[in-house]
DNA sequence: AAGGGATGCAACCGCTCAATT
DNA sequence: CAATTGAGCGGTTGCATCCCT
Protein backbone atom coordinates (compact mmCIF):
# COMPACT_ATOMS: atom_id res chain seq x y z
CA UNK A 1 0.00 0.00 0.00
CA UNK A 2 0.97 3.53 0.46
CA UNK A 3 2.52 5.59 -2.17
CA UNK A 4 5.86 5.59 -3.72
CA UNK A 5 8.18 8.24 -2.37
CA UNK A 6 8.09 11.46 -4.28
CA UNK A 7 11.74 11.09 -5.03
CA UNK A 8 14.73 8.92 -4.41
CA UNK A 9 15.75 10.01 -0.99
CA UNK A 10 19.09 8.36 -1.29
CA UNK A 11 20.31 10.82 -3.86
CA UNK A 12 18.79 14.05 -2.76
CA UNK A 13 20.16 16.92 -0.77
CA UNK A 14 18.26 18.21 2.19
CA UNK A 15 18.40 21.24 4.34
CA UNK A 16 19.26 24.77 3.41
CA UNK A 17 19.64 25.63 -0.23
CA UNK A 18 22.96 26.84 -1.53
CA UNK A 19 23.32 29.85 -3.73
CA UNK A 20 24.32 27.64 -6.60
CA UNK A 21 21.21 25.51 -6.24
CA UNK A 22 19.07 28.62 -6.17
CA UNK A 23 20.69 29.87 -9.33
CA UNK A 24 20.21 26.57 -11.09
CA UNK A 25 16.57 26.46 -10.13
CA UNK A 26 15.89 30.05 -11.11
CA UNK A 27 17.63 29.81 -14.44
CA UNK A 28 15.88 26.57 -15.26
CA UNK A 29 12.45 27.97 -14.49
CA UNK A 30 13.24 31.14 -16.40
CA UNK A 31 14.10 29.07 -19.40
CA UNK A 32 11.41 26.42 -19.20
CA UNK A 33 8.80 27.76 -16.86
CA UNK A 34 7.15 25.95 -14.02
CA UNK A 35 6.23 22.53 -15.20
CA UNK A 36 6.48 19.06 -13.86
CA UNK A 37 8.07 19.48 -10.47
CA UNK A 38 8.81 15.83 -10.21
CA UNK A 39 10.96 15.88 -13.29
CA UNK A 40 12.41 19.31 -12.74
CA UNK A 41 15.28 18.47 -10.39
CA UNK A 42 16.79 16.01 -12.79
CA UNK A 43 16.29 18.29 -15.75
CA UNK A 44 17.79 21.21 -13.89
CA UNK A 45 20.66 19.17 -12.57
CA UNK A 46 19.60 19.48 -8.97
CA UNK A 47 19.94 16.81 -6.36
CA UNK A 48 16.70 17.82 -4.76
CA UNK A 49 13.25 16.44 -4.35
CA UNK A 50 10.72 18.00 -6.68
CA UNK A 51 8.63 19.10 -3.76
CA UNK A 52 11.62 20.82 -2.29
CA UNK A 53 12.22 22.68 -5.55
CA UNK A 54 8.64 23.78 -5.71
CA UNK A 55 8.70 24.99 -2.14
CA UNK A 56 11.92 26.87 -2.64
CA UNK A 57 10.60 28.55 -5.75
CA UNK A 58 7.19 29.37 -4.33
CA UNK A 59 8.39 30.66 -1.01
CA UNK A 60 11.66 32.27 -1.76
CA UNK A 61 12.78 32.58 -5.35
CA UNK A 62 9.69 33.75 -7.18
CA UNK A 63 10.36 37.19 -8.59
CA UNK A 64 7.01 38.63 -7.58
CA UNK A 65 7.50 38.01 -3.90
CA UNK A 66 7.24 40.92 -1.56
CA UNK A 67 9.80 40.62 1.18
CA UNK A 68 9.86 42.55 4.36
CA UNK A 69 7.58 43.31 7.22
CA UNK A 70 3.85 42.97 7.08
CA UNK A 71 1.93 46.20 7.20
CA UNK A 72 -0.83 46.84 9.69
CA UNK A 73 -3.32 46.61 6.87
CA UNK A 74 -1.98 43.21 5.94
CA UNK A 75 -2.16 42.16 9.58
CA UNK A 76 -5.79 43.07 9.81
CA UNK A 77 -6.63 41.46 6.52
CA UNK A 78 -4.99 38.23 7.59
CA UNK A 79 -6.92 38.26 10.83
CA UNK A 80 -10.19 38.78 9.03
CA UNK A 81 -9.48 36.14 6.45
CA UNK A 82 -8.42 33.70 9.11
CA UNK A 83 -11.62 34.34 10.96
CA UNK A 84 -13.48 33.47 7.84
CA UNK A 85 -11.40 30.73 6.30
CA UNK A 86 -9.50 29.24 9.20
CA UNK A 87 -6.07 27.81 8.56
CA UNK A 88 -6.47 27.94 4.82
CA UNK A 89 -3.17 29.65 4.34
CA UNK A 90 -3.09 29.30 0.61
CA UNK A 91 -6.47 30.95 0.28
CA UNK A 92 -5.39 33.71 2.61
CA UNK A 93 -2.15 34.14 0.70
CA UNK A 94 -4.10 34.50 -2.51
CA UNK A 95 -5.55 37.70 -1.12
CA UNK A 96 -2.16 39.13 -0.28
CA UNK A 97 -0.16 39.68 -3.42
CA UNK A 98 3.49 38.90 -2.99
CA UNK A 99 3.01 36.91 0.18
CA UNK A 100 3.25 33.16 0.41
CA UNK A 101 1.17 30.75 2.39
CA UNK A 102 4.22 29.62 4.30
CA UNK A 103 5.16 33.16 5.15
CA UNK A 104 1.68 33.98 6.32
CA UNK A 105 1.46 30.80 8.31
CA UNK A 106 4.73 31.59 10.04
CA UNK A 107 3.69 35.17 10.61
CA UNK A 108 0.42 34.05 12.07
CA UNK A 109 2.06 31.65 14.46
CA UNK A 110 4.76 34.03 15.56
CA UNK A 111 3.12 37.44 15.58
CA UNK A 112 -0.59 37.54 15.05
CA UNK A 113 -1.47 34.84 17.52
CA UNK A 114 0.23 36.82 20.21
CA UNK A 115 -1.31 40.02 19.05
CA UNK A 116 -4.78 38.55 19.27
CA UNK A 117 -4.13 37.05 22.67
CA UNK A 118 -2.99 40.43 23.85
CA UNK A 119 -6.34 41.75 22.71
CA UNK A 120 -8.05 39.00 24.62
CA UNK A 121 -9.11 37.18 21.51
CA UNK A 122 -8.70 33.50 20.97
CA UNK A 123 -6.71 33.17 17.74
CA UNK A 124 -8.46 29.98 16.75
CA UNK A 125 -12.05 30.89 17.40
CA UNK A 126 -11.70 34.65 17.08
CA UNK A 127 -13.85 34.95 20.13
CA UNK A 128 -12.99 36.70 23.33
CA UNK A 129 -10.97 34.49 25.55
CA UNK A 130 -13.16 33.32 28.36
CA UNK A 131 -12.38 34.20 31.93
CA UNK A 132 -9.67 36.40 33.26
CA UNK A 133 -7.18 33.97 31.91
CA UNK A 134 -7.32 36.06 28.83
CA UNK A 135 -3.80 36.91 27.93
CA UNK A 136 -2.09 36.75 31.22
CA UNK A 137 1.14 37.49 29.51
CA UNK A 138 -0.50 40.24 27.62
CA UNK A 139 1.54 43.26 28.22
CA UNK A 140 -0.47 46.00 29.75
CA UNK A 141 0.26 48.26 26.88
CA UNK A 142 -0.15 46.16 23.77
CA UNK A 143 0.42 49.53 22.26
CA UNK A 144 -1.57 48.92 19.10
CA UNK A 145 -4.44 47.55 21.03
CA UNK A 146 -6.52 49.22 18.43
CA UNK A 147 -10.01 49.43 19.78
CA UNK A 148 -9.64 45.96 21.04
CA UNK A 149 -11.58 46.39 24.20
CA UNK A 150 -13.85 43.87 22.56
CA UNK A 151 -15.19 43.39 26.01
CA UNK A 152 -12.53 40.81 26.27
CA UNK A 153 -12.98 39.94 29.87
CA UNK A 154 -16.62 40.68 30.12
CA UNK A 155 -18.48 38.95 27.36
CA UNK A 156 -17.68 35.44 28.28
CA UNK A 157 -20.62 34.04 26.47
CA UNK A 158 -20.34 36.39 23.60
CA UNK A 159 -21.12 34.33 20.55
CA UNK A 160 -18.82 36.15 18.26
CA UNK A 161 -16.02 38.62 18.58
CA UNK A 162 -17.59 41.96 17.98
CA UNK A 163 -14.37 43.20 16.48
CA UNK A 164 -14.54 40.76 13.72
CA UNK A 165 -15.66 42.57 10.67
CA UNK A 166 -15.54 40.10 7.88
CA UNK A 167 -15.32 42.57 5.12
CA UNK A 168 -13.08 40.82 2.68
CA UNK A 169 -12.54 43.66 0.37
CA UNK A 170 -8.91 43.86 -0.54
CA UNK A 171 -9.04 46.78 -2.78
CA UNK A 172 -10.98 49.90 -2.10
CA UNK A 173 -12.89 49.49 1.11
CA UNK A 174 -16.06 50.42 -0.61
CA UNK A 175 -16.31 47.05 -2.28
CA UNK A 176 -18.38 45.61 0.43
CA UNK A 177 -19.24 41.99 0.47
CA UNK A 178 -22.86 41.18 0.66
CA UNK A 179 -23.01 39.28 3.86
CA UNK A 180 -26.65 38.71 3.60
CA UNK A 181 -27.73 35.91 1.43
CA UNK A 182 -28.87 38.59 -0.91
CA UNK A 183 -31.40 36.70 -2.90
CA UNK A 184 -30.77 38.75 -5.92
CA UNK A 185 -27.25 39.68 -6.85
CA UNK A 186 -27.47 42.90 -8.74
CA UNK A 187 -23.93 42.57 -9.98
CA UNK A 188 -21.99 39.59 -11.16
CA UNK A 189 -20.72 37.63 -8.27
CA UNK A 190 -18.24 34.88 -7.99
CA UNK A 191 -17.48 32.23 -5.49
CA UNK A 192 -14.50 33.30 -3.46
CA UNK A 193 -12.92 29.91 -3.80
CA UNK A 194 -13.10 30.28 -7.52
CA UNK A 195 -11.55 33.67 -7.41
CA UNK A 196 -8.80 32.27 -5.29
CA UNK A 197 -7.92 29.76 -7.90
CA UNK A 198 -10.00 26.81 -6.85
CA UNK A 199 -11.76 26.20 -10.05
CA UNK A 200 -13.83 23.31 -8.90
CA UNK A 201 -14.77 24.32 -5.45
CA UNK A 202 -17.46 22.50 -3.61
CA UNK A 203 -19.16 25.56 -2.38
CA UNK A 204 -22.86 25.34 -2.45
CA UNK A 205 -24.69 28.25 -3.81
CA UNK A 206 -25.78 31.21 -1.78
CA UNK A 207 -27.68 30.28 1.26
CA UNK A 208 -25.68 27.18 1.78
CA UNK A 209 -26.08 25.96 5.31
CA UNK A 210 -22.47 24.92 5.63
CA UNK A 211 -21.43 28.44 5.27
CA UNK A 212 -18.71 28.00 2.73
CA UNK A 213 -20.51 29.51 -0.14
CA UNK A 214 -18.69 32.76 -0.21
CA UNK A 215 -20.02 35.01 -2.81
CA UNK A 216 -18.59 38.35 -3.45
CA UNK A 217 -19.40 40.81 -6.16
CA UNK A 218 -16.73 41.61 -8.63
CA UNK A 219 -15.23 44.99 -8.28
CA UNK A 220 -15.54 47.33 -11.16
CA UNK A 221 -13.26 46.38 -13.95
CA UNK A 222 -12.41 43.19 -12.18
CA UNK A 223 -12.71 39.91 -13.90
CA UNK A 224 -12.08 36.35 -13.04
C1' DA B 1 31.74 38.38 27.43
C1' DA B 2 29.34 34.07 27.89
C1' DG B 3 25.48 31.07 28.47
C1' DG B 4 20.83 29.90 27.96
C1' DG B 5 16.24 30.65 26.67
C1' DA B 6 13.08 32.78 23.28
C1' DT B 7 11.98 33.86 18.73
C1' DG B 8 11.56 33.65 13.69
C1' DC B 9 12.17 31.57 9.41
C1' DA B 10 13.18 28.03 6.03
C1' DA B 11 12.43 23.53 4.95
C1' DC B 12 10.59 18.78 5.56
C1' DC B 13 6.88 15.40 6.18
C1' DG B 14 2.66 13.32 5.53
C1' DC B 15 -1.78 13.82 3.95
C1' DT B 16 -5.52 15.13 0.63
C1' DC B 17 -7.34 16.14 -3.72
C1' DA B 18 -7.68 16.22 -8.62
C1' DA B 19 -6.16 14.50 -12.96
C1' DT B 20 -4.91 10.68 -15.60
C1' DT B 21 -4.69 5.88 -16.96
C1' DC C 1 -15.12 2.92 -11.89
C1' DA C 2 -10.95 1.86 -9.50
C1' DA C 3 -6.07 2.48 -9.20
C1' DT C 4 -2.26 5.37 -9.78
C1' DT C 5 0.24 9.57 -9.97
C1' DG C 6 1.61 14.26 -9.13
C1' DA C 7 0.74 18.77 -7.21
C1' DG C 8 -0.47 21.36 -3.45
C1' DC C 9 -1.51 22.22 1.39
C1' DG C 10 -1.06 22.51 6.40
C1' DG C 11 1.40 20.99 10.45
C1' DT C 12 5.68 20.45 12.40
C1' DT C 13 10.61 20.58 13.07
C1' DG C 14 15.41 22.22 13.04
C1' DC C 15 18.52 25.73 13.08
C1' DA C 16 20.26 30.38 13.15
C1' DT C 17 19.78 34.64 15.38
C1' DC C 18 18.36 37.70 19.00
C1' DC C 19 17.80 39.08 23.66
C1' DC C 20 18.19 38.86 28.47
C1' DT C 21 20.61 37.72 32.62
Image (cartoon, coloured by chain):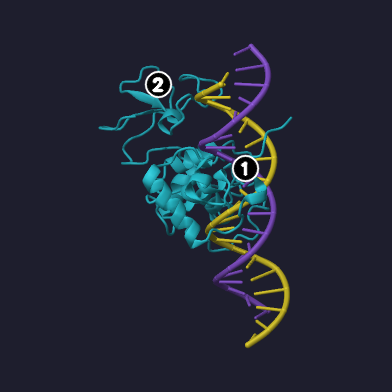
Chain colours: A cyan, B yellow, C purple
Figure quadrant of the C terminus of chain A: top left
Q: Residue at x 52, y 42 (%)?
A: A89
Helix, strand or loop at mark 2: loop
Check the residue under mark 1 and report the chain it is in.
A
Q: Is residue A25 visible?
A: yes
Question: In front: B16, or C3?
Answer: C3
Check the residue under mark 2 and report the chain it is in.
A
Q: Residue at x 44, y 57 (%)?
A: A23
A96 shown above or below C15: above
Figure quadrant of the N terminus of chain A: top right
Using the image, tell me which numbered label, if any, was put on residue A182.
Answer: 2
Q: First in sequence: mark 1 or mark 2? A: 1
Mark closer to the observer (1, 2): 1
Question: In front: A190, or A148?
Answer: A190
Q: CA distance from mark 1 to mark 2?
A: 49 Å
- Left or right, residue A48 beside residue A31: right
Amino acid sequence: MGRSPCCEKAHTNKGAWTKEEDERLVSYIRAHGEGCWRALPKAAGLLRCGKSCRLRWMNYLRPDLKRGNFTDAEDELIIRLHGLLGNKWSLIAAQLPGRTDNEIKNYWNTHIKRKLLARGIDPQTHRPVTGAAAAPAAKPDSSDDGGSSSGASAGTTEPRCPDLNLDLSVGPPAAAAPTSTSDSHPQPSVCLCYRLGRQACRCAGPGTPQGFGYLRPLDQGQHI
